Amino acid sequence: MLLSIGIPLITFTQYIEVERSVSFLSTQNFILTDTITNEPINIDYTSTILWSIYLLGVVLFLFRFLKNLFQLNQKIRKNVKFKNKEFTNVLLNDLVHPHTFLNYIFLNKTNYENNQLPDEVLLHEETHAKQKHTIDILFIEFLQITFWFNPLLYVIKKDIKLNHEFLADHAVLKRGVNKSTYQKILLAFATPNNYIKNHSSLANSINYLLIKKRFTVMKIQTSKTVFWFRSLLLLPILCVLIYGFSQHKVVEKPVEIHETEVTEAMIQEYIEFIDKYEKTKIIDFLVYERIVAIYELMSDKQRNTVKKYPDNMIPSLAKVKYKIPIENEFNQWKNSEKFAIWINGRSVKNTELDNYKATDFKYYTSSFVHNNARSKKYPQPYQNHLYTEKGFEETYLKYGINKFRRLFDEYKKLDDINDFEKQLIKVQLEKLYKSLSNQDIKKYNIKNPATLNVFKKNINKDTIPKNIESYVQARTYVLNFIKKQDIDYPLGYLTLSETEQKYFNKLYRLMSDEYMKLSESERKSAPLQIAPPPSPKEYELIDGKFHKKKVVGTFPPPPPPLSPLPKNPSKALIELKKKYDEQQEIYGKLISSLINEKKGTTEELRKASVHVTNLYKEYSAMAEKEKDKRNKSKVEGFPPPPPPLSPLPKNPSKALLELKKKYDQEIAIYGKLIGSFISEKKGTTEELRKASVHVTNLYKEYSAMAKKEKEN
C-alpha cells in the first residue's frame, strides 16, 4: 500500500545535450481581429459537482470514524477496568466478542468473572495489543477517509484484518496450544448466538466469516526455502512497477563550450555577493574589488547568467579632506565604557588620549556598534578611529599605493596552481594602477602589472585539478575573512562576536571538507591548511590578554563513599563518619569554586585533599576493626574442626571407606558454615553448634573403627 503511494512520486530524470537555439515568433502566425461573437458562454459545473460529492464522502467517513472512537472511549470510561501486565482489561455488561483497541482488551464481565473465557482467547487478544495491530487499522481508516471512493482500500482493509488474525493465531499455537482444541474454541466463540452486540470497526476481534481461511492457514507449513523464493519473485515485480508507474522527466542540457571563463566557485562567490547586496543594500568594500575582477574575467556566456555589480561604489580615499575633532567630543572619547579607540589603526586604551590634543588628529571616524556585533574585547557601543597627520597620509593619501603593494605581495606568494587567483589579483592591480597619478607611480616605483605573465597555459577550467581549485577557493574565503576582521589569528578569533565566530566556523568547515577530498598527491601540491580556531571555553581574558585556562587535574577526586556502618557501631565510629561527610562536602565545594569561580588557592585544595583522604583511611580501619571484633565474639566457644583423619589401614573395610567419605563431606559443610557466618553474616550459632558436634562424633567413630581394623 505504501509502495502504491510512493512509486508515483519517484522521478527518473534523463539529461540530453542540445545546442541552444533562439527562435523568433513571426507576426504572420497571429491574426488580430475585432470581431465579437454573441455565442452563449457554457459553464461546466462537472468539477464543482465532483468535488462536492468527494467532500460529502470525506465528511461522512470522518463522522463515522470519530463516532467509533467516541464509542470506544465511552466503553473505557464507563466500565470496570483493571491493569493486567501491560494491558488493561475492560469488563463490559454487553454480550460481545472479546476484542482489542490499542492496549485495551474488551471482555464480557459475566464470562470473565465466571472463568468462562479460555486462556487461548485471552492470549489471542493480548497478541493483537502487543503487536500494535490497532495502529494498522487507524492508518487504513485515515486513508479510507481521504480515498473513500477507491474500492481497493476496502479489500486491503479486509486483508489487513485477516493478516492480524493469522499473526495472533500463530502466536497462540507457538505457545504449545493444541491446534484442534484451539480451532474448536474459535468455532465456539464465532457462533452468532453466543454474542449479540457488534464491536467497533476499529477493534480486532474473532470473526466467524474469517474462521475458514484461518483454519486453512493453520494447516499450511511454509518452509524457509519457499519463503525466500517467494520473496525473491517480488523483486522483478517491484522493478516493473517502479519503472511502469514512476515519472520520467527529460531535461535538456546545453552543450558545454570551452572558452576563457572563471570557475564555478568564483561564480557562486559573485552570486552570493550580489544577493547580499540586494537584500541589505550594504557593500562589503573589502571584497568589492575582487567581485569586480571576477566579473571582468567572466565569459560573455557567464555574464548573461548573472547581474552586473553596482558601479562606482568605492570612493577615492585620496580625495578625503581633514576632519579635526573638537575639544568637547575629544574629551568624551576618554570614557572607556562607551568608546573603543584606535589610533592610526592600532587599538589603544582610552587613557592614551591624555598624551594628545584634539588638534593632533587630522581625521577621525565614529561608528555605533549594535549589541549582536559587539565582542568580549570590544564591548563598547562606539568605535572611534583617529588619525594623526602621518597616519592620515598612510591610511588615506597613500591608500591606493599601499593596497597595490599588498596585492602585489599576495600575487608573488601564489604558486602556479593558483593561476585563477593570480589572474583575479592582476585585474585588480591593473585597475589600481590606472587610478594612480604619474607622480605617485614614479615616486613609489610602482611596476606596471600588464607586464606580469600569469598563465603558462590558456585559462581554462581544466588547467588545474578541480579538487585543488575548490580547496584553494575555500581557503581564500577564510583568509579574506581574517583580513577583513583585522585580527591576529588564531587568538584574535576569541575577540569576535558570537555571530562572527559562527560564520568563521562555517567557512573553516567548508575549507576542511574540500581538503579531505584531495588525494595524497594533490595535498602535496596544495597550500597547507590554516590552523583551526581555538575553543573559547579553553581561554580566559586576563589583563587584556587571552590565557589558556588552568585545568585542575593534578588533585585526586574525593575518596569513594564510606562502607556502611557495622551493627551496633561505637560512638567514636559514628562521630568519625559525621566528620568525614562534612570534610568531603567542603572539599567538593573547594574544587568547584577553584574551577568555576577562580576562588581559593591550589595549596588550600591540596591540604583539604590530604585531610579527607586521611579521614577515609581512619574510618575504614576503625570500621574493619569493629567488624572483626564482632565476628570474633560470635564464633568464640566453637572448637575448630578436628585434625585430619589418620591414614586408612591396608585392605580397609567397606564400612570404614563409607565413614571416611561421610566425614569428608561433613567437615567441608562445617567449614563453609563458619566462613558464611563470619563473612556473610548467614546462619545461626545453633546451626554451628550442631554441625560441630556432628563432625566431632564422626571423627571419633572413624578413629575407633580404623584403630580396630589396624589391630586385626
Image (cartoon, helix red, strand yellow):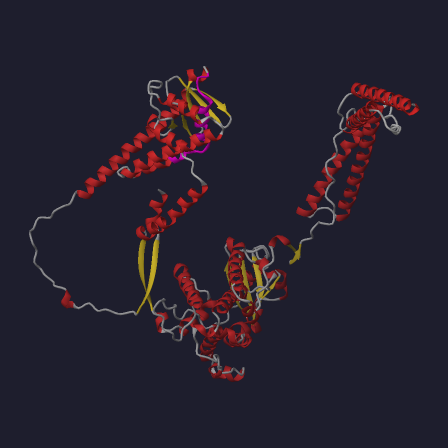
Q: Residue at x 76, y 35 (%)?
A: 580
Residue 210, above or below 420? above
Q: Position of residue 679 (x, y in %)?
A: 78, 29
The quarter of the picture where residue 616 lies is: top right
Query: Where the N terminus falls, by quadrant?
Result: top left
Q: Is residue 166 magenta?
A: no
Q: Position of residue 366 (x, y in %)?
A: 51, 62
The foreground one among 577 and 172 is 172
Residue 116, above or below 618? above
What is the tally of numbered marks visible in this picture?
0
Q: Is residue 134 magenta?
A: yes
Judge whether residue 98 can be spotted in this image.
no
Q: Which residues are magenta?
A: 115-136
The quarter of the picture where residue 334 lies is: bottom right
Q: Residue at x 48, y 79 (%)?
A: 454
Judge whether residue 588 can be spotted in this image.
yes
Query: Where the C terminus falls, by quadrant?
Result: top right
Q: Give the side of residue 314 with respect to residue 703, left or right.
A: left
Query: Residue farthest to the right?
Result: 711
Q: Give the side of residue 603 with respect to residue 337, left or right.
A: right
The foreground one among 194 and 711 is 711
Residue 501, above or below 435? above
The foreground one among 37 and 318 is 37
Q: Position of residue 170 (x, y in %)?
A: 44, 32
Secondary structure, magenta segment, majority class? helix
Q: Position of residue 180 (x, y in %)?
A: 42, 25
Q: Residue at x 35, y 71 (%)?
A: 301
